[in-house]
Image (cartoon, grey):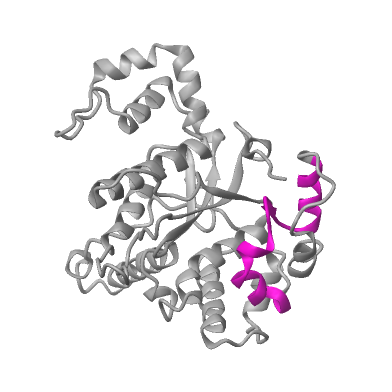
Amino acid sequence: MGLARSAYVKEGQEGVFHCFCRCVRRAFLCGIDPVTQRDYSHRKSWLVDRLRQLAAIFAIDVCAYAVMDNHYHTVLRTRPDLVALWSDREVATRWLTLFPPHRRKKDKANPPTDKQISALAHNRKRIARLRKRLSSLSWFMGRLNEFIARAANKEDDVTGRYWESRFKCLALLDDAAIAACMAYVDLNPIRAGLSASPEESDFTSIQQRLRAWHQEMIEQTSIAKRDTPIQAVSTPIPDSTDWLCPIRSEAQRRGILQITTAEYFDLVDKSGRLLRSGKRGSIDADLAPILLRVGIKPDAWVDTMSRFESRFRLAAGLLSSLRRFADQIGRKWLVGLTSARTAFAASIQ
């Protein structure tokens, strides 16, 4: 029996979730349709651009994403603590940016005026509702999927459903589940045989993070050498990670994991090599300590990471986390308890 999403995605409570969606009617997000030979490659950038736009409006962190040919994955963290700090005026500005008033069919909607923002900001009951919506997983995913569906249907000159369902959602209860799921998402193109390495995995968060990190290293090297102005070696990067949740906490921003960015890169890179080579038992000695620190059993890592989506339902995490989750939603048993016992350590050292 299914479970209403509202039973475990609680309004006003922080949570981390693996959200994914698949197309219907042989629709393609990108790539070449083998039947019609039409190229839909441009649609992947639609989804990444929309994720970036929504991340700037909602109090929701985008931690990982991967856009495939006919489906996509995201790891999202709701941040009701952030939206609670926003002024009524900021809530109004963000909402009117998302839903501009007096939208014209042929013209681009103009930015909200000061008068429109002030009028909405003074409606206290309305602002209270919008404050909840701006940290709502369902509202975020709805605005993402609706935008892509409308654009694709318009391009195909058809009507009807574009996605097979609203979206599927898995609660990630602790660092072990988050690390495994993020690696699973970032390595989707490698697992599918579409790319050979993380840096070659187009339209993934890991590629975007690696490009930004590489550019940062170039800039730091230039400053250290003091022989070339930064402007001479630095080029604008369309793949800036400013809108992505940092791996580890920074001065002004909370991270998603208790490991450094370099350690996460190492985790994904070495895991990708294992997936690509087809070797499922050899874990690098340097990789094992990273896994142990987040509560993952090294000997089960490849199987956990490569089959994450099929191993769990509703939630993923340490056995103790899943048991608490089952109590919260009033269930005695969950799909994934056996997988949790196999994949994750009993406790994090």
Inspect this view and state whether residue 100 appears: yes
x, y percent for residue 260: 55, 64
Q: Is residue 286 left or right of residue 241?
A: right
Look at 20% across and 72% down and name the residue there: 228
Inspect this view and state whether residue 349 appears: no
Look at 52% across and 58% down and name the residue there: 247
Q: Quadrant of the C terminus?
A: bottom right
Is 344 situated above or below 89?
Answer: below
Magenta-colored stretch includes residue 236: no
x, y percent for residue 221: 32, 73
x, y percent for residue 209: 41, 64
x, y percent for residue 116: 28, 17
The magenta segment: 298-327
Look at 52% across and 49% down and name the residue there: 76
State the residue lying farthest toward the left: 106
Is 60 situated above or below 222?
Answer: above
Q: Is residue 81 left or right of residue 130?
A: right
**Number of residue marks:** 0
Q: Quadrant of the N terminus?
A: top right
In depth, the one of 104 and 204 nearer the eye is: 104
Is 119 situated above or below 275?
Answer: above
Magenta-colored stretch includes residue 308: yes
Residue 211 appears in which quarter of the rendering? bottom left
Q: Is residue 284 left or right of residue 276?
A: right
